[in-house]
């Protein structure tokens, strides 16, 4: 079968029309926003990794001054191990995957909080310059985590709005773009903590 110049022109026009329709249908926008979400997720993981890297130094510093806080130190080490073992594939940032990751990180946050509270009983440790520096780095890291989580949630909101809006939702369904999960507030964080002296 011979292809005539007219058929070639017709095929070229169909190809051009198809390319233009895909570029204007939002596919490239969804790819761009998906990559942005993955980049923000990498920054979240980076901030959590920084915290995980600080914990051994913090535990070693506290261990030297507070030998009878062994159970608290063990809880921190175990929580760190669990938190670093839970990973999320950037291609599967579903609500369930994010919730599982967040749960392990929240458990680590709680154990660090208990450790820092137990340190109050050791004035020598509180005055230790290494401990003060580690505590300041940990506080700074917690702030970084909050900033990166917020940036991630904003990128996910932008992405989810795009893939769920008409007519993008049709193209998203065809090419497998699914809504992604966000970080949620920890259970009970809506209630102010009770402070007693």
Image (cartoon, helix red, strand yellow):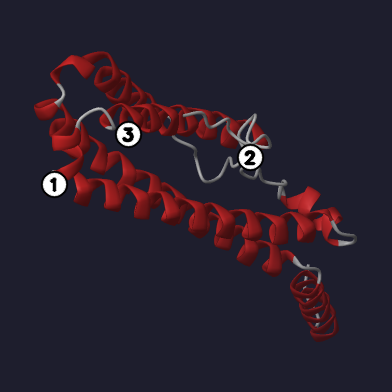
Q: Position of residue 49 (x, y in %)?
A: 33, 44
Q: Residue furthest front?
A: 197
Q: Residue 96 carries which label?
A: none
Left or right of 18? Residue 45 is: left
Q: Position of residue 145 (x, y in %)?
A: 45, 51
Marks 1 and 2, Cα distance to the nearest angstrom? 32 Å
Classify mark 3: residues with Cα within 10 Å, few (<14), some (14-19) or many (20+).
some
Mark 1: which secondary structure? helix
Res 130 label: 1
Question: Of marks 1 and 2, which one's residue comes earlier in the chain?
Answer: 1
111 sits left or right of 71 in the view: right
- Image quarter for residue 125? top left
Find disc 2 in the rendering and name its residue. Answer: 185
- Residue at the location (60% across, 34% down)? 186
Q: Which residue is drawn at 13% across and 19% down?
A: 67
Instruction: Name, please, the residue furthest toward the left.
Output: 64
Residue ID at (58%, 37%): 98
State whether residue 93 is above or below residue 23.
Answer: above
Q: Of residues 133 and 157, which is closer to you in this image?
A: 133
Numbered badge on residue 116? 3
Q: Which of marks 1 and 3 is nearer the N terminus?
A: 3
Distance (Cα) linking label 2 and label 3? 22 Å
Quadrant location of the N terminus in the rendered image: bottom right
Q: Nearer the viewer, mark 2 or mark 3?
A: 3
Residue 113 locus on image (x, y percent): 39, 32
């Amino acid at each position: 079968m011979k292809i005539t110049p007219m058929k070639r022109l017709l095929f070229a026009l169909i190809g051009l029309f198809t390319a233009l329709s895909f570029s204007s249908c939002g596919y490239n926008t969804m790819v761009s926003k998906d990559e942005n979400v993955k980049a923000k997720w990498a920054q979240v993981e980076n901030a959590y990794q920084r915290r995980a890297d600080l914990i051994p130094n913090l535990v070693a510093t506290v261990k030297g001054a507070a030998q009878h806080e062994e159970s608290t130190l063990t809880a921190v080490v175990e929580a760190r191990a669990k938190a670093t073992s839970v990973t999320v594939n950037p291609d599967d940032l579903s609500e369930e995957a994010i919730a599982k990751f967040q749960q392990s990180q929240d458990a680590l946050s709680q154990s660090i909080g208990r450790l820092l509270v137990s340190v109050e009983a050791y004035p020598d440790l509180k005055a230790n310059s290494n401990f003060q520096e580690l505590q300041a780095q940990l506080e700074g890291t917690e702030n970084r985590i909050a900033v990166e989580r917020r940036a991630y949630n904003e990128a996910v909101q932008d992405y989810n709005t795009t893939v769920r809006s008409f007519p993008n939702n049709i193209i998203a369904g065809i090419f497998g773009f699914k809504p992604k999960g966000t970080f949620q507030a920890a259970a009970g964080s809506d209630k102010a903590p009770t402070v007693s002296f």
